[in-house]
Amino acid sequence: MTRRSFIRILMFALLILTTAIAPAQAVKTSSDLTGFAKEAYKFISITGDKALIVFTIEDKSERYAEIEKLFEDSFDINHIARFTIGRFWKKMSKYEQQQFMEDFKPYILATYTSQQWKTEGLDFTVLDSVPVNSKTVKVETIVQGMEEEQSVSIIFHVKKTENGLKIIDVLLEGVSIGITQRNSFERILNRNDEDFEAFLTILENYAYDFQESMEE
């Protein structure tokens, strides 16, 4: 799946929603949980509500700024960057590694800011928060449309870091955004014979073109 195809799927899920009938699901409240699981439940509840507002901002520059803040506050960008580059990390020079870490954030921000999302009538609900290990929790959520049968399952993997709770991956209807992005990067690198300079230029140009479009 290409990056463009995945974005179309993501947009379709959030804007139109799936027409499959979703089974009734039990919803826990934060009072049913304790410790890290309870923290993660509240964290995702607040973050999800913010996202539904931020992604609807009409002005592209303002939307970019708010999404950047959301990403910095709620996502472990360095962790995600390292995961998405996968096995190629060790093949990069120190300079290329540093450059990739610098290029990743503006590339991802440009990707998710490029279009205004329509979220009217959508309801974000946290269903459960389940510890995976001592540092990671899986938070199960659902985005519900105006009709009961319209729903999208979203699972957040939340990690406890020195900077607080951070999202390290998101699964949309079972599809990992992190793995999808890693596969996309791998295809780009394979097409360019693992030329890291060409790969980094692609990321930089995409982010640059988006920045230029905000000034038009």
Image: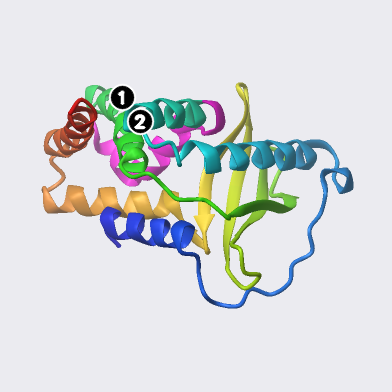
Name the residue beneath numbered marker 1: 102
> Magenta includes 85?
yes
x then y, percent, for residue 98: 29, 23
Secondary structure of the residue carrying tag 1 is: helix
Q: Where 154 sits versus 17, above or below?
A: above
Task: Identify the residue at image location x=43%, y=28%.
Answer: 68
Q: Which residues are magenta?
A: 73-92
x then y, percent, for residue 48: 60, 43
Question: On the rendered image, what quadrant is the C terminus found in?
Answer: top left
Q: Residues within 10 Å of mark 1 (few under 14, many from 20)?
A: some
Task: Identify the residue at image location x=52%, y=55%.
Answer: 171
- Label 1 sits on what residue type? Glu
Quadrant of the image occupied by residue 57: top left
> Magenta includes 144?
no
Quadrant of the image occupied by residue 64: top left
The answer to whether residue 25 is left or right of residue 169 is right
Query: Are the residues at dot 2 and dot 1 in contact (C-beta closer than 8 Å)?
Result: yes
x then y, percent, for residue 20: 55, 77
Task: Identify the residue at image location x=30%, y=62%.
Answer: 1
Q: Which mark is residue 64?
A: none
x then y, percent, for residue 116: 38, 44
Nearer the observer, 104 or 133: 104
- Label 2 sits on what residue type? Lys
Question: Residue farthest to the right?
Answer: 31
Scheme of image coloration? rainbow
The answer to whether residue 7 is left or right of residue 80 is left
Name the residue beneath numbered marker 2: 105
Q: Of tags 2 and 1, which is closer to the observer?
A: 2
